[in-house]
Image (cartoon, rainbow, N blue to C red):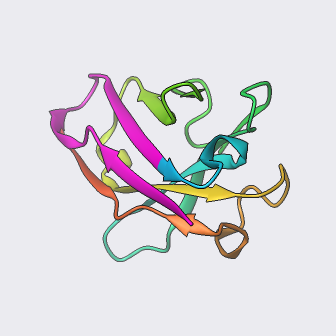
Amino acid sequence: QVQLVESGGGLVQAGVSLRLSCAASGRASSTYTMGWFRQAPGKEREFVAAISRNGAFRYYAESVKGRCTISRDNAKNTVSLQMNGLKPEDTAVYYCAAKSGFSELGVINAYDYWGQGTQVTVSS
């Protein structure tokens, strides 16, 4: 079992930066591919970014590419999502997730573990 707890969300103005964190605990959490997803009100959950277990490979959704950076610190069992130039359309609940293997990164059902989410609200 892997437990994931997100933090760092909040209410911010458009254009600013925000850093989300995900604390992982449990069995061999550092061996999992980690991903970030988000779900806006009335919309389906969507993929944001993923990082391989050693941090060597990263993959981003087109909607955030160039504005977001995913990173991880396996010594601290944390994964972060740095978001710059936030837009109102980035408003959503952001979820951290873990899966085995670096494939099907955008497939929600491919992830084995999920956090409870952290709310990000961007005002215009």
Q: Picture quarter containing residue 52?
A: top right
* Above or below, 1 relative to 9: below
The image position of residue 102, as x and y in percent, is 83, 49
The residue at the point 47 percent across, 49 percent down is 25
The residue at the point 77 percent across, 58 percent down is 100
Q: How many marks?
A: 0
The image position of residue 123, as x and y in percent, is 16, 41
Decide whether the magenta segment is chiefly helix, strand or loop: strand
The residue at the point 60 percent across, 55 percent down is 27
Quadrant including the N terminus: bottom right
Please state which of residues 20 and 45 is positioned toward the viewer in this rendering. 20
Q: Picture quarter containing residue 64?
A: top right
The image position of residue 3, as x and y in percent, is 46, 59
Report the magenta residues as a range. 1-24
* Above or below, 109 relative to 16: below
2 in magenta: yes
The image position of residue 48, as x and y in percent, is 57, 48
19 in magenta: yes
Which residue extends farthest front?
Answer: 27
Please state which of residues 93 and 44 is positioned toward the viewer in this rendering. 93
